[in-house]
C-alpha cells in the first residue's frame, strides 16, 4: 500500500494516476462571436443570442454553464442523480455562474476559483477524486461571458471604452467534461498542480505577460517531474496567454532547453481571427481553454489526430480591488495530460 | 481493488476514508473583538490591531491567512517545501486573500470558493486527496475579515449604517489545518459533500435562515449515509448560522427524528457574547468555523473532552450582483467527521 501511494507522486508538483479516469463526454457552448471564429466547427452549440434568453448577462452565463453540464450528462446516457461530484468555477464575484448553475442539479458540489485556470483546476481535482476511488462519475466544468466579465472587471459596456492592443477578449463560452472510471475514451494520466507565481507585473491590460511565467513554471515542472518533453505530445495548449503571452512563454521555455514550436498552441490565440474579429491579443476567460479543450482538442483526440495532449489553463489572480491598491498580478497554471491509445 | 473503491462511498453524499488523514497541527488567528469573546482562551494568536500592520484590510486579511499557514507548518516542524498541496479560499472577490497569501509559499495550490463553507470544503478536498494517496502533507486554510467583507458586501464602514437584529458579524480570523498520513492525532473519518440548496430566501440581512436548510440537508444525509445519529458525536458544530439559523436548523432536524439538543452548537453563536459585543444574531464569515474548529474543537479533542466531532461549515452563495438582480440566496454545507481514540 505504502509503495503504491508513493508511486503516485512524481516530483514536487506532479502525480501519475494509477487508474486513469476516462473523459466519457464533453460539451462546448459558445457565443455568436466565438461561433464565427476559426474553431466554429468544433463547438457543440453556438448561441445566436449571447443573453441566452435571460434578463442579465450573469444569468445568461449561468444558464449556459448549466446547459453544458446537463448536455454532457445526457450525452453519456446518465442522469444528474448518477453524478457523484460536480467541480465548477467561474470568474464572477462569489462564483454566481457556477453556484446558480448547480442549484437545481442536486449533485454534491465543490466550487473552485482559479480565474482562467479553472478548466484544468476542476479537471485535476475531479481526476484526483476519481483516481482516489471516491466516485464513478464526476463532472468538471467552467464558464465565462464577455459581457459579465467586462462590466465586472473593466467598464460598463455602454462606455464604449477603447481597448489597448495588448488587451484580450473574454470568451463567451462554457465547457464541461464528464469523467468515468472505465471505457474506450481519452484518459487522464498526469496532473501537474501549479504554484502561485508573481513577477511584479501590474498592467491588467496585459494579462498574457502576467500569466506567462506561471505557465512556464508549470510546464517546465511537468517535464522535469515526468521526464517527458515537447516531443512526447502531439499538442501542448496553454489557456489564454494570447499572442503576446504565448511568445513570451515559448521563448522562456526554450531557455530551459525545450523547443515546443511544433506542438504548442494557445487557446486564446486560436479561438478568434484577431484582425477580422478585433480581438487584439487574443481570447481569455475560463471559457476559453474550456471550449477549446472540450471542442477542438477532445474531438481531435477521438479522431486520432492527437494521441497525447497537455492542457495548461492559466489564471491571473488579481481583483479590481488589488489592482486599485497597486498590487501586482499573481498567476497560476495547472497542467493535465490526456492520452488516447 | 474494485471492492475497496466501492466501499469508500456510502450513499449519495458521503465517503468513508480508508486511511484516515491525521490533523497534525492547527492554527487560529483572530482579531481583537474575537479575542475579547468567550472562546478567547482557545485561539493561538490574538491580533491587537486588525490591520495587522498593513495598508488595506484586504492585505491585512491575506497576511493573517499567510501567518496561520506558516505557523501551522512550523508547529509540525516542517517547511513549506515539504507541503504537497495547499487548499484555501476566502470571501473576497477573486480570492485575493488566499491568492496573495499563497504567492510566496511555493506550494502547489488549489483555490476554492464556498463562501463561509470554505473550512470544511478545503478540509474535505485535502482529506480526499490525501486518502487517495497523492500526498504526505496538505494544508487546508481559510480567512475572513470584518472590515474587508463589510465594505465589499455591504457598505463602506464610514457610513456607520445600522445593522438589523438578524444581521451577523463577519469574524476577523484565519484558520489552518495540516493533514498528515500518520501520527497520534485527531483523524478525519467521513466526508459528506453538500449540494447547493435554494429555498427562495432573498434577505441578505438574514443569512442564517438562508443557510439553515443547506446545513440540515447535509446533516440529515450524513446521518442517513453513515447510519450515525447525534448520539454518536460529542459535538456537532455548524459554521455560522447564528442564533436564528441555529434554531431553525435544530427544529428542522428534529422533524426528521434526530434530537441534536445535547451536542449541537453553532460556531457563529459561540464566538461572541452577543449582547455585550453587539454582534446581533452571531458571527459569520469563513474565518468563523475555521477558528472555532482549529481552536475550540481541535484543542478539546486533544484534551480528550470531545472524542467524535462533526463540523459543518455553511455558505451563502449569493453576490451583491445577484442580490441586486433580485435572485434568492443559494446555500451549501459540507460536513467533516473528526475522531480521536
Image: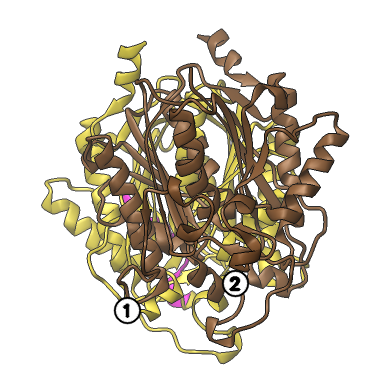
Chain colours: A yellow, B brown
Query: Label 1 lies in what chain?
Result: A
Foreground pick, A137 / B210 = B210
Name the residue: 22% across, 35% down.
B77
Rendered image quadrant of residue A149: bottom right
Vertical arrangement, residue A204 with respect to residue B305, above or below: below
Q: Is residue B71 visible?
A: yes
Badges 2 and 1, same chain: no
Q: x, y (%) of residue B52? A: 33, 67
Q: x, y (%) of residue B284? A: 60, 58
Cα separation, mark 2 vs mark 1, equals 21 Å
Decide: few, some or many residues near mark 1? Use Cα within 10 Å; few <14, some 14-19, many ≥20.
few
Q: Which mark is residue A267?
A: none
Q: Is residue A50 visible?
A: no
Q: Is residue A275 magenta?
A: yes
Q: x, y (%) of residue A206? A: 33, 74
Name the residue: 41% across, 61% down.
B97
Q: Which residues are magenta?
A: A264-276
The residue beneath circle 1 is A326
Name the residue: 45% across, 42% down.
B294
The residue beneath circle 2 is B153
Amino acid at each position: 500500500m505504502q509503495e503504491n501511494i508513493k508511486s503516485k507522486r512524481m516530483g514536487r508538483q506532479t502525480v501519475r494516476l494509477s487508474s486513469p479516469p476516462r473523459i466519457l463526454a464533453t460539451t462546448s457552448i459558445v457565443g455568436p462571436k466565438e461561433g464565427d471564429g476559426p474553431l466554429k466547427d468544433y463547438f457543440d452549440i453556438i448561441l445566436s443570442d449571447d443573453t441566452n434568453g435571460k434578463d442579465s448577462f450573469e444569468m445568461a452565463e449561468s444558464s449556459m454553464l448549466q446547459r453544458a453540464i446537463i448536455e454532457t450528462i445526457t450525452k453519456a446516457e446518465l442522469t444528474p442523480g448518477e453524478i457523484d461530484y460536480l467541480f465548477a468555477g467561474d470568474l464572477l464575484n462569489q462564483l454566481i455562474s457556477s453556484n446558480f448553475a448547480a442549484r437545481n442539479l442536486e449533485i454534491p458540489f465543490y466550487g473552485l476559483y482559479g480565474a482562467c485556470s479553472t478548466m484544468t483546476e476542476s479537471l485535476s481535482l475531479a481526476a484526483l477524486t476519481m483516481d482516489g476511488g471516491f466516485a464513478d462519475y464526476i463532472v468538471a466544468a467552467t464558464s465565462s461571458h464577455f459581457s459579465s466579465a467586462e462590466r465586472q472587471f473593466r467598464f460598463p459596456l455602454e462606455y464604449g471604452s477603447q481597448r489597448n492592443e495588448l488587451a484580450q477578449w473574454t470568451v463567451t463560452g462554457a465547457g464541461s467534461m464528464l469523467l468515468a472510471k472505465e471505457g474506450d475514451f481519452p484518459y487522464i494520466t498526469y496532473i501537474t498542480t501549479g504554484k502561485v507565481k508573481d513577477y511584479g507585473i501590474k498592467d491588467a491590460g496585459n494579462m498574457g505577460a502576467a500569466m506567462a511565467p506561471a505557465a512556464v513554471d508549470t510546464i517546465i515542472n511537468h517535464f522535469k517531474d515526468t521526464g517527458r518533453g515537447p516531443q512526447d505530445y502531439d499538442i501542448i495548449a496553454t489557456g489564454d496567454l494570447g499572442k503576446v503571452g504565448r511568445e513570451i512563454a515559448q521563448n522562456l521555455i526554450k531557455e530551459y532547453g525545450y523547443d515546443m514550436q511544433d506542438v504548442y498552441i494557445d487557446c486564446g490565440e486560436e479561438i478568434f481571427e484577431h484582425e477580422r474579429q478585433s480581438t487584439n491579443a487574443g481570447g481569455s476567460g475560463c471559457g476559453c481553454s474550456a471550449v477549446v479543450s472540450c471542442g477542438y482538442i477532445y474531438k481531435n483526440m477521438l479522431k486520432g489526430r492527437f494521441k497525447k495532449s497537455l492542457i495548461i489553463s492559466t489564471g491571473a489572480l488579481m481583483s479590481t480591488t488589488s489592482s486599485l491598491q497597486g498590487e501586482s498580478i499573481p498567476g497560476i497554471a495547472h497542467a493535465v495530460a490526456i492520452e488516447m491509445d
